[in-house]
């Protein structure tokens, strides 16, 4: 091969190699640019509890690298409003401060997913059929807090009453489900007085739910209404017939 041919082959090879390197660097540059390209996504301005209506003051637009935006995330405020510019979504799960709002964690207020959406993560719902006397005279409302009392007979037929659980959230009364954004609930006392029974659904940890199921079978369960402002865990010893003494 003559020197001219070798020189021409070297030039062509250099041009091809240079083109390959340029294409690689150009692809890498575009990939890096898309990775760090900034975009806007909606995030929680502060903690948003499950069931809370997502209003404008609870969210904010945050600039993040486009590659870090989660699937099905809301990208602008208008996506969170209905045609009348009113909030149209509720938090299906608790949202942490700074967390992106995605369609997997919030729900349309007009949809009817039901009771499961107001049960906090890690908890269960347990329903009791109670008389008016057992359910605070039928005056319970969704969202109230109650202590759960159990009365039964132990060995040797000795009757005892125990406080099984304290400050338990009422998730539903009859078919009215707790909604933290709801102002009031329909008065259904007359209906209760006609049926003489009320369905009350409580929010309990899984083991507590199992204990309550057993308590229903082994004795009589009743509820005592508590103040939502009282965060004290009280020491409540069991009581029996011997405690029913004057003075």
Image: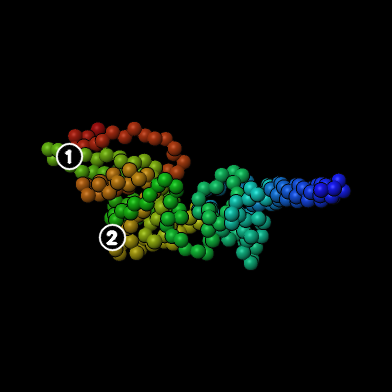
- Neighbor class of circle 1 (other Cα within 10 Å; few <14, some 14-19, many 20+) is few
Which residue is labeled 1 in the image? 154
Residue at 65% x, 49% y is: 67
> Real-space Cα distance between discs 2 and 1?
29 Å
Is 121 or 36 nearer to us in this picture? 36
Q: Which mark is residue 196?
A: 2
Q: Is residue 125 visible?
A: yes
Q: Is residue 54 visible?
A: no
- Neighbor class of circle 2 (other Cα within 10 Å; few <14, some 14-19, many 20+) is some
Which colour style is shown?
Answer: rainbow
Looking at the image, is 3 positioned above or below residue 179?
above
Which numbered disc, 2 or 1, marks the residue closer to the eye? 1
Please identify the quadrant where the C terminus is shown: top left
Residue at 59% x, 54% y is: 71
Q: Quadrant of residue 188?
A: bottom left
Is 36 or 144 nearer to us in this picture? 36
Give residue 22's position: percent from left, percent from top: 78, 49
Looking at the image, is 187 positioned above or below residue 169?
below
> Most extreme residue toward the front, as rendered?
1
Looking at the image, is 140 positioned above or below residue 240?
below
Is 183 or 102 nearer to us in this picture? 102
- Image position of 185 (left or right of 237): right
Residue at 22% x, 49% y is: 217
- Image position of 160 (left or right of 165): left
Helix, strand or loop at label 1? It is loop
Q: Which mark is residue 199?
A: none
Give residue 215's position: percent from left, percent from top: 25, 46
Give residue 200's position: percent from left, percent from top: 35, 54
């Amino acid at each position: 091969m003559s020197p001219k041919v070798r020189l021409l082959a070297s030039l062509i090879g250099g041009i091809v190699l240079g083109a390959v390197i340029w294409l690689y660097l150009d692809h890498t540059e575009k990939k890096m640019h898309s990775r760090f390209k900034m975009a806007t996504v909606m995030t929680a301005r502060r903690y948003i509890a499950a069931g809370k209506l997502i209003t404008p003051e609870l969210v904010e637009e945050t600039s993040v690298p486009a590659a870090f935006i989660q699937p099905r995330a809301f990208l602008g405020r208008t996506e969170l409003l209905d045609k009348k510019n009113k909030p149209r979504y509720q938090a299906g799960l608790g949202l942490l401060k700074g967390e992106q709002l995605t369609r997997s964690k919030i729900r349309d207020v007009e949809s009817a997913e039901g009771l499961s959406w107001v049960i906090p993560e890690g908890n269960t719902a347990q329903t009791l059929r109670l008389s008016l006397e057992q359910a605070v005279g039928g005056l319970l409302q969704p969202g109230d807090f109650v202590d759960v009392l159990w009365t039964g007979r132990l060995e040797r037929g000795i009757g005892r009453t125990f406080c099984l659980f304290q400050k338990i959230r009422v998730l539903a009364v009859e078919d009215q489900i707790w909604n933290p954004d709801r102002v009031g609930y329909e008065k259904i006392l007359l209906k209760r007085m006609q049926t003489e029974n009320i369905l009350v659904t409580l929010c309990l940890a899984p083991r507590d739910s199992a204990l309550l199921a057993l308590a229903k079978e082994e004795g009589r369960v009743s509820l005592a209404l508590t103040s939502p402002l009282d965060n004290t865990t009280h020491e409540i010893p069991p009581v029996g017939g011997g405690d029913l003494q004057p003075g």
